Amino acid sequence: MATLAKPDTRPNNTHFSSGPCSKRPGWSLDALSDAPLGRSHRAKVGKTKLKQAIDLTREILNVPADYRIGIVPASDTGAVEMAMWSLLGERGVDMLSWESFGAGWVTDVVKQLKLADVRKFNADYGLLPNLSEVDFDRDVVFTWNGTTSGVRVPNADFIPADRKGLTICDATSAAFAQDMDFAKLDVVTFSWQKVLGGEGGHGVIILSPRAVERLTSYVPAWPLPKIFRMTSGGKLIEGIFVGETINTPSMLCVEDYIDALNWAKSIGGLDALMARADANAKVIFDFVDANDWIANLAVDPATRSNTSVCLKIVDADVLALDADSQAAFAKGVVALLEKENVALDIGAYRDAPSGLRIWAGATIETADMQVVMPWLTWAYETQKAAMAKAAA
């Protein structure tokens, strides 16, 4: 059997991981030369850097002036857990999930916090639950963008302005790439290693005035670990939101986040970031429309992510295989691309349906995305030929 011809061009940047994500174009270690290494984060220089990161976050994301922004431990996971353990329990809660991370928050609320009044709204990978059934007189926890399913809420229209409960939104793969209406969101969390490609380990939590009011008027029935505490003596610990972090941050990571934020500002801010992500995602969507062996995992085009684009292999011969063999086929495609060093870390998340997951966020150059698409075809056809040979 003849060897299939490889595409002639290779991308300049081969990093398409959905987290940690690709560094910004032109990044090098020199960008971190101003990091105050070996200095205390409580020294003036450390507080200044942390405050700069907070101020740039507010500027680029267009966060309202009366919302607090804090840098917290343990990535987006830490930020979400901090919000749930600190705020939930005052009233019933509706939990929304349509992929693995949202499902994890449901598990934590039901099995760890053990709240009595919990309603679960779950949907299979590729779909959203029925948002019209959600009761916003209750608290509501949801992901804006399902990182492992590629399904996002198209907008915040399903959230009423006159809600009585709080909305807690895990936005870690949506921040800096999708237009979030902060007026509809009481808690927003994300991590640095997602859309802007910052180094990991730190989370950001954004609180509305309504969330702050809950924090200062409600005391949970369970003890709170120190790293979750945002109040003291019934008052908000304001220092958290001006750069006085709860625990010691990496000033190298802070510098990297500042660099990413400054890059975002230099190219035009949020509008430019969203436009870059949209352009990258469109390359993939156009490729999928032109090839009948692959499909978008997200069923409704209006809900398709422009960052973590999840794809499934729908070739009839592959679908005729059992689930393990289908997964092996997809992993074979991924392995071929990695071996050729053209697209790294694009396998589906371990709990998701087998297939591909390609990061399309703003730090990816559209020209590189265009170059990768023919390689997907080459890897698929090569794997298909190997499967046919093995069956002969």
Image (cartoon, rainbow, N blue to C red):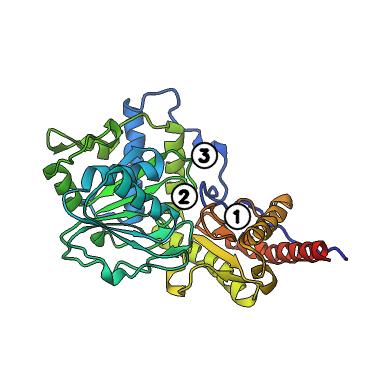
Q: Which residue extends farthest front?
A: 322
Does residue 353 appear to the left or right of 127 in the view shown?
right
Q: CA distance from mark 2 to mark 1?
A: 17 Å
The total number of labels drawn is 3
Q: Nearer the viewer, mark 2 or mark 3?
A: 2
Q: Is residue 255 left or right of residue 69?
A: right
- Please, is residue 82 above or below residue 309 in the view? above
Identify which residue is drawn at 32% across, 46% down: 111
Residue under pointer 3 = 31
- Quarter where residue 10 is shown: bottom right
Image quadrant containing the N terminus: bottom right
Q: Which residue is mark 1?
A: 347
CB under 8 Å between discs 2 and 3: no
Q: Which residue is mark 2?
A: 194
Question: Which element carries disc 1, helix, strand or loop?
Answer: loop
Q: Earlier in the sequence, mark 1 or mark 3?
A: 3
What amino acid is labelled 3 in the image?
Ala
Real-space CA distance between mark 1 and mark 3, rounded to the nearest whole angstrom:
30 Å
Q: Residue at x 50, y 33 (%)?
A: 33
Instruction: Give residue 62's quadrant in the image.
Output: bottom left
- Residue at the spot x=42%, y=48% of the render? 261
x, y (%) of residue 29? 56, 37
Instruction: Identify residue type, mark 1.
Output: Gly
Vertical comparison of 7 with 14: above or below? below
